[in-house]
Amino acid sequence: CCSGIAKKKLISMERASHAQRL
């Protein structure tokens, strides 16, 4: 049920970390 939300959270976190690196 919550796999989609967890995936979105992981993707958003990854994007945030990449943005911080750049």
Image (tube, rainbow, N blue to C red):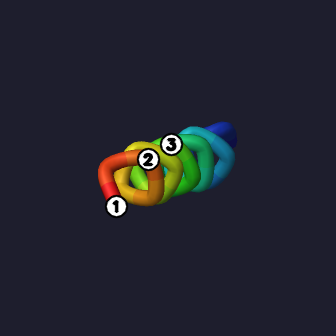
When the figure is inspected, residue 22 is found, relative to residue 14, above or below; the finding is below
- Rate crowding at label 3 as few (under 14), some (14 to 19) or many (20 or more) other CA atoms within 10 Å: few
Q: Amino acid at mark 3?
A: Met
- Identify the residue under disc 1: 22
Q: Position of residue 2 (x, y in %)?
A: 66, 38
SS state under label 3 = helix
Q: Are marks 2 and 1 in contact (CB under 8 Å)?
A: yes
Q: CA distance from mark 2 to mark 3?
A: 11 Å
Which picture quadrant has residue 6? top right
Identify which residue, 4 or 8, lies in the foreground. Answer: 8
Q: Is residue 11 left or right of residue 5?
A: left
Q: CA distance from mark 2 to mark 1?
A: 5 Å
Q: Nearer the viewer, mark 2 or mark 3?
A: 2
Q: What secondary structure is found at the residue carrying circle 2?
A: helix
In terms of image quadrants, where is residue 3?
Answer: top right
Give the amino acid at mark 1: Leu
Q: Nearer the viewer, residue 6 or 2?
A: 6
Q: Which element is circle 1 on?
A: loop
Q: Which residue is mark 3?
A: 13
Circle 2 sits on which residue? 20
Which part of the image, by quadrant, shows the N terminus? top right
For the point 50% across and 42% down, the residue is 13
| Amino acid under disc 2 | Gln
Badge 1: residue crowd in 10 Å (few <14, some 14–19, many ≥20): few
| Mark closer to the chain start, 2 or 3 | 3
Q: Are marks 3 and 1 in contact (CB under 8 Å)?
A: no
